Image (cartoon, helix red, strand yellow):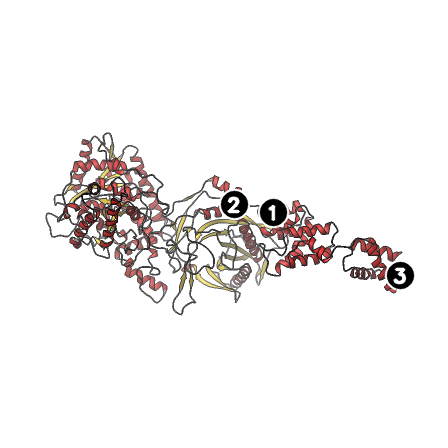
Amino acid sequence: MAYLIQGETGDWELVIGLEVHAQVISKAKLFSGAATDFGADPNSQVSFVDAGFPGMLPVINEVCVEQAVRTGLGLKSQINLTSVFARKNYFYADLPQGYQISQYDQPIVGEGELLIDLADGTTRAIGIERLHLEQDAGKSMHDQHPTKSFIDLNRSGVALMEIVSKPDMRSPEEAGAYLTKLRTILRYLGTCDGNMQEGSMRCDANVSVRKKGEQGLRTRCEIKNVNSIRFVQQAIEYEARRHIDVYEAGGDIRQETRLFDSAKGETRSMRSKEHAHDYRYFPDPDLLPLVIGADFVEAVKATLPELPDDKKARFMAEYGLNAYDSGVLVAERASADFFEGVATGRDAKMAANWIMGDFFAAMNSGGYSWEKPPVSAAHLGAMIDLIKDGTISTRLAKDVFVFMVETGKDPAAIVEEKGLKQVTDTGAIETAIDAVMAANPDKVAEIRAGKDKLIGWFVGQVMKATQGKANPAMLNELILRKLKE
Amino acid sequence: MMSELTRLTIAEAGRRLAKGDFTARELTEAHLKVMEARRGLNAFITETPELALESASASDARRKAGQAGGLAGGLEGIPLGIKDLFCTKGVQTTAASHILEGFVPQYESTVTANLARAGAVSLGKLNLDEFAMGSSNLTSYFGGVENPWKKGSDPAARLVPGGSSGGSAAAVAARMAMGATGTDTGGSIRQPAAFCGIVGIKPTYGRCSRWGVVAFASSLDQPGPMARTVEDCALMLNGMAGHDPKDSTSAPMPVPDFAKALTGDIRGLKVGIPAEYRPDGLNAEVARAWDQGIEWLKAAGATPVDISLPHTKYALPVYYIVAPAEASSNLARYDGVRFGLRVEGGSLDDMYRKTRAAGFGPEVRRRIMIGTYVLSAGYYDAYYSKAQKVRRLIAEDFTQAFRSVDVILTPTAPSAAFGMTDRSDDPVTMWLNDVFTIPTSLAGLPGLSLPVGLNGDGLPLGLQLIGRPFDEETVFKVAGVMEQAAAFTAVPEGV
């Protein structure tokens, strides 16, 4: 069960901690009124504060504070009513002030926990160490000119939440599950869009290994800025293997920052601890300690949505779904809402099956999103009603569904228009059966002689004769009666 | 007529402008003339005569139309100098540093915008110590400012005006401006005010917005007025102060009409006299001026109370940890990337090194290095963290003292103005200039310096009044009484 890597000297265990930088959803930056839209022209969303001009001062954006508190509550974490912004000092061309305003020893959010959902259906709690607010730096572009670097300050000052886990993960799968779950929670809360490609969620992984059963932690390496969950898993796997190889060759791992090269699938050294910056953290004298009231926290708490773990538990209890189906449906708030839109007052299991089957297939066929789904929840619900009241069979429903996707029409209208109503008239079905029996006397004889395998063939023929509209249950029953007569 | 106009106080000029005795344009022209005549003092880095005349005429037009702003005749049409640490839209702002030479802000500091709204006329940008780091104005990239006062014993010697607001003090003393903005981090308003025989107040930290003021040490920097009378400072402070949402450390406090505090009645007030400000070897003339001040207050019905501010001796070392630490970070933005000086280099780091080596003078470099050192891993606890703790003890000393007194009286500086070539070799001797003003800054309290007389060599001496947080009114009230008693009418050479 435990994930272990076999080395020449025995089994090794992984120890993984993740630091996620999540861009706060907010119209304005953390300390300035400049806009935060992605993809704007370079340097078009920059205030004098963001550009570090003389005499400019930061003013905290309350929306960002609320978002951090909301996220902290979503991660079941301690909310610190007093927190302090500190300056992290270093020189770089895309860091206009010469320091990043961050939180150091007094973050706004303290310890909490996050439940990860594993492939085998089990869950495991991963500790959250802290969450703090900080400003993003600008972006340096070194490939635009042969000798010059270009700087885009649009990101400069954008609010980030740095969410730090405890070193509780033991496999790349768990790291992936952590990121997936964290992203789900952030999206539920509406505090970060979780888009790793656009860089609004970035991950640094701290990786070390130890012999199975060993206590304590060995030296870790930090892999910076990996931009997809798959790459994080690859990077961890590569890095763990590297550590094991070094140890087994009698070497030692030095603490360092590494980069993941996704093209080569390997990590390489960026800077060692000896060359690490001395950030000279100190409380930012331009900002007073951030003090929030318990009533403010309560007010935020009151607006929290139902979170995925609670929703999953409710889906299992209320709709009788299994853990897997519930987990799939709650992965996004929109999918959960869609499910409830279909399932309420109906056969929930049937609703879940349709959504996770034909509906997801249509969704994945391209061009669709939760804002613009292939069929609406109301239409899918109406279709299930038509199945339930016997108007169409499940088999017919698949055709109806295709027409619904194509035309966007109401299922009842489609049934009417296409004449897809199921035949439940015994006489009509019997006539069809009689015709098939009359045309195939040899087969009838074989069945009557005990060759039951042919019954299915018979059903198919009759169904074909009725263009699939015969009620399958009735058809089965009538065929059996007639053939055994 | 011209020289007559430059001898007026702001309050008198305001009344006479209201009466129509002269126009704001005439008043400004008179000051521009003096500026021209006294250019040798090097008080201004950038003169803006055209802009000054333009806004003076606009003031006259407003007055004619009956829209004169300001507070009861306050600052409408009054020509002022602006320390070149305040960013001024469209006008070069240098902080007296080569690294900002040619920098023209596209924004106006809150304080100067407030003054403009009150109708004041800006004459230009005044010289200062580079990034406000100094007590002599000798660290300015644009050259030292000369104090208009002369020693009786050596009239040829050129004296410093003090610093960092040396250009402000010299300009006001020499009648180039009726008043000037200053900023005070450890004494930068009060010490030059004392050296130049004028009045200056560092308000309570948070009283005036720091937005748009080039930062030196954010937790200490505070803009304030410098003028020739207590009342003028009160009028100016009213024009400068007020809560500013753009400065998170600006206090959301109402601004009283400070001039109204000048009732002349200080009967029953308790005035603290701290023992620690009378160290062995205190300059005898300074001690005598202080004793004289105590007598004046007693005569006016106040009661002197001996107090102790036991942590005073740590103030200077604390200040020279905290202020450089903040400065080392605040000045990181001057990197040659976006504005000001850039010296090209073979790499980014090389450009940083060359730009900052060429752009910053020795005192600024010294403080950046000290600040970087005290914040470094392994030294932070021993220096910065310890200094912050002691800073709280110093503030607590004042809190304790103000349980039993209403205001505190001390000397402003340990000596009168010194020669421009006297002490530039030893930084620590220079730093000792601020030994009496720094504790107030560390505690964030209001401190005012006013001239109380001349020393034996004909140079002005100042006394400092320290008040409770946001109680500038009591400080002004007591200062007004002392001003009356001192009847300081001496003027520097050439006035």
Q: Which residue is mark 1?
A: A311
Q: Chain of mark 2?
A: A
Numbered label attached to residue A349:
none
For marks 1 and 3 on the same chain, the one whose residue lies earlier in the sequence = 1
- Within 10 Å of disc 3 (Cα), the crowding (few <14, some 14-19, many 20+) is few
Q: Which mark is residue A73?
A: 2
Determine whether, in the image, residue B103 is placed left or right of residue B289: right
Q: What's the distance in space between the residues labelled 3 and 2, CA to CA? A: 71 Å
On the same chain, marks 3 and 2? The answer is yes
- Check disc 1 and give the amino acid type: Lys
Asked whether residue B163 appears in the rendered view, the answer is no
Task: Specify whether B278 is left or right of A175.
Answer: left
At label 2, the amino acid type is Leu
**Does dot 1 land on a helix, a strand or a loop?**
helix
Residue sitting nearer the eye, B423 or B168: B168
Instruction: Using the rendered view, name the quadrant where residue A450 is placed.
Output: bottom right
Pointer 2 local density, CA inside 10 Å: few below 14, some 14–19, many at least 20: many
Q: Position of residue B473 (x, y in %)?
A: 27, 37
Q: In what element is the residue under mark 2?
A: helix
| Residue at mark 3 | A449
From the viewer's perspective, tell me whether residue A309 is left or right of residue B337: right
**First of labels 3, 2 by sequence position:** 2
Q: Are marks 3 and 2 in contact (CB under 8 Å)?
A: no
Q: Position of residue A111 (x, y in %)?
A: 50, 46
